[in-house]
Image: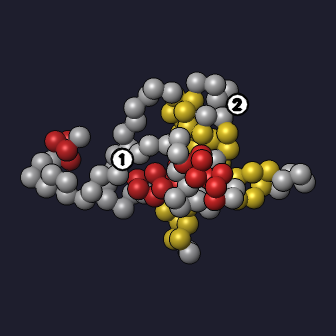
Amino acid sequence: MNTNNEAIRAENIVKSFGELTVLRGVSLAVKRGEVVCIMGPSGSGKSTLLRCLNWLSPPTEGTIWLGGEVLGLQETSNGKRVVLPDSKLRRQRSRIGMVFQSFNLWPHRTAIGNV
C-alpha cells in the first residue's frame, strides 16, 4: 500500500452500536491537500464515519491510517493490535481537523444551497 501522498486512508470500516450496524465496509483515501465533502441523507452514517476517522468513536472493524501511521492502535510484540494510550491517541488526533455542521445551519436554504 502506497500511502506517501495520502493524508488519511480507511479500509473496510464497520461501526456497530449493539445490533445496529451503521457503517458496513466503508473504504476511502484522501490525498494530501485534497478537500473532501461527505454528503448524504440524514441517518446515512456521515457523522459516524467522521467520528470513526478521528477515533472519537473507534470503528468496530477496519483500519485507519493517518499519514501512513495506523490510527488509534499499536501492535504488540506478539503481533496483536491494542488501543493506544490516551496520550498517544491525543497526539495523533492533534494532526486532524474536521468541521461538523450543525443541523439546520441555514434552514431557509436547500441542501445544495447549504454546500
In which quadrant of the rendered view does residue 2 lie?
top right
Please, is residue 32 above or below residue 88 in the view?
above
Locate residue 58 relative to residue 100 in the image: left or right: right
Which residue lies at the image location 56% right of the left edge and 74% below the top edge?
A: 19
Locate residue 7 relative to residue 114 in the image: left or right: right
Quadrant occupied by the C terminus: top left
> In the orientation shown, which residue stands out farthest toward the front?
87
The tag on residue 99 is: 1
Q: Amino acid at mark 1?
A: Val
Q: Is residue 64 visible in the rendered structure shown here? A: no
Locate residue 77 relative to residue 64 in the image: left or right: right
Quadrant occupied by the N terminus: top right
In which quadrant of the rendered view does residue 41 lie?
bottom left
Q: Badge 2: how crowded within 10 Å, few (<14), some, or many (20+)? A: few
x, y (%) of residue 42?
31, 59
> In the orientation shown, which residue stands out farthest toward the left?
108
The figure's colour scheme reads: secondary structure
Locate residue 82 relative to residue 114 in the image: left or right: right
x, y (%) of residue 18?
56, 75
